[in-house]
Image: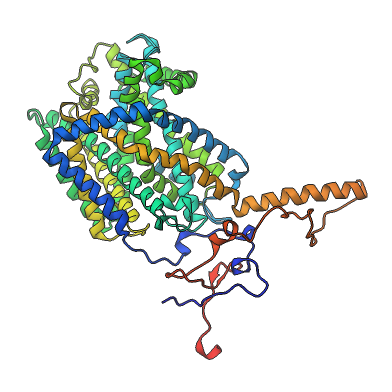
Amino acid sequence: MSSFPRQDPPAGSRYPHDTHPGLVPGVSVEEQRVRYRTDRITFGVAGALIIGFVVWGAVSTESLTTVSKGALDAVVTYGGWIFTLLAAVVLLFLLYVGFSRYGRIPLGKDDEAPAYSMGSWIAMLFAAGMGVGLIFFGVYEPVSYYMSPPPGRAEPESYHAMHSAMAQTIFHWGLQAWAIYALVGAAVGYAAYRRGRPLLMSAIFGQRAHLSVGGRLIDMFAIVGILFATSASLGLGTLQIGRGLQIVTGIGEVGNGVLIGIIAVLTCVFLVSAVSGVAKGIRRLSNINMVLAAALAFFLFVAGPTVFLLDFIPSVVGTYFGEMFQMLSLSASWGPEAEQFMRSWTLFYWAWWVSWAPFVGVFVARISRGRTLRQYVSVVLLAPTVICVLAFSIFGGTAIWLQRSGTDIAGAASPEDMLFRVLDALPLSQLTPVAVMVLLAIFFVTSADSATLVMASMSQQGKPVPDRRIVVFWGLALAGVSAVMLAVGGADAVQGLQDLVTVAALPFALILLALIPAFLRDLSTDPMSLRHRYARTALENAVRQGMGEHGDDFALQVRHEPGPAAAGHDVDSTGERMSSWYRRTDEDGRPVAYDYARDSYVEPDPPEHR
């Protein structure tokens, strides 16, 4: 039972807790009195789907491969336009939110200080969005475009192809990717730290949406999307660790047995960290990884073609903006070559970011608490994109320069081998592969640990510290799906991973499109939006009346005005949409007393004072 008294609105009060919705400073999720439970429907259905997928892949890999290829064909043919539309619309929407009147609204309560300094915030944003992708695709993707440019863009292996290759890479990893992350982060952060809702995707659609059928479906799709995206990332990391083992130890070709063994070992490590709650250890590992990744990029910059890179990077930025609309407009309507390119690259990336969005978005929301939407949009879009330009230009530019200088980077036996060929052509070639393997292993552990905790939390209605058994289940599911995705890929494991991620992301892409009007609806009734609306109406009416009655000599005065000249005459501030969200309840959903002036619950009187 709650220790707080039931509360009925005071006599004559039209608002919850006798507080006008425009005067509410915000409600944080930590202040809410909630009893978290395992959502048996969300957890049960999502878990059953994943178990079924793992069993299917283990028992009949060929049939799963056939079905996944057919599903991919259908998604690309009938749903590819959805991903393309999403990538464009989300960026435009965020720019509108950040630089309109909504930009002053904080992801937190009024006057709440930012959770982290600007430097720490940007560093954590970089860590959230790069990970294994930078190590795996940093060389592979630009070299692939250089040797075989996107349709209609440049001649293979030309100077134009060199710049266009980097522009296409940054297009996939830059503004559009971070716009998708930023949309989810802004909506989740606003709902949790401004409206007091759980840290769930479904909470964006309403205070109790996570308990509805639609809300549970949204959270299920979010869990499945996180699982497939993280599994694909871990699969790519495993492939590259396996290749590193071949180079460092001199063993023969690494098969699926060894790769699954790598997954098993690293799974044990991240499960121990996840269930033991060694948050400080994981943060320390993340910081070590940041330093290692920066050191590797700096090594390539110094040991590689430094002067060439200094010339190359500004040119890449110009090419990126110059070819932006051409890259955005590419679709299957341009012919079979364009369709194949979209299938293999652009659609995969949009799908990957969509699948990662619930995971990265929740993380970005947490570290961005206290920032205004204008600060949030500016930094979350620009800072990681700038880092992306520098990092990929160094990795990809060095690889292309070596290719043009006679080192056969493109002739590597597999995508995961390309980075090691670059390192082999530079000094310290005996040490750098080991550093890359350590980097990948830490990325594996930290990414899997964080993703497992997020999925477990979503399974328990947003519980901040989920139960260990739920964490272990999702950790094992993550490992199982990673192994199955590698097996389904067969000889072309990378393409197999990409295909499955693209298929799994489509439902959540539709959810993200629906998220935009839901988020906008919340922003339009935010206390700060209401105050701005009232101020604009009141000021306009008062100035008109003052000039009409007194010319230049008038001053403004607040008075009761029930007529059409009232500031809020066209606003129903007592309606459910405006006022229900800040009504406080106990763990059982019963109203309790709260004092917004003091920002605290009203304690019951002791018996002797009653």
The relative height of residue 56 versus residue 158 in the rendered view (above or below) is: below
Residue 6 in the image, given as x and y percentages of width and height: 52, 76
Residue 197 in the image, given as x and y percentages of width and height: 46, 57
Is residue 323 among the parts visible in the rendering? yes
Q: Who is closer to the viewer here, 363 or 484?
A: 484
Q: Who is closer to the viewer here, 449 or 279?
A: 449
Q: Residue furthest bottom?
A: 608
The relative height of residue 11 versus residue 219 in the rendered view (above or below) is: below
The structure residue drawn at horizontal position 32% and vertical position 42%, both measured from the top left corner, is 225
The structure residue drawn at horizontal position 16% and vertical position 39%, both measured from the top left corner, is 57
Left or right: residue 592 compared with residue 509: right
The relative height of residue 439 versus residue 117 in the rendered view (above or below) is: above
Work out which quarter of the rendered image holds the C terminus and state it: bottom right
Q: Who is closer to the viewer here, 595 or 507?
A: 507
To which quarter of the image does residue 299 belong? top left
Left or right: residue 398 compared with residue 521: left
Residue 490 in the image, given as x and y percentages of width and height: 15, 29
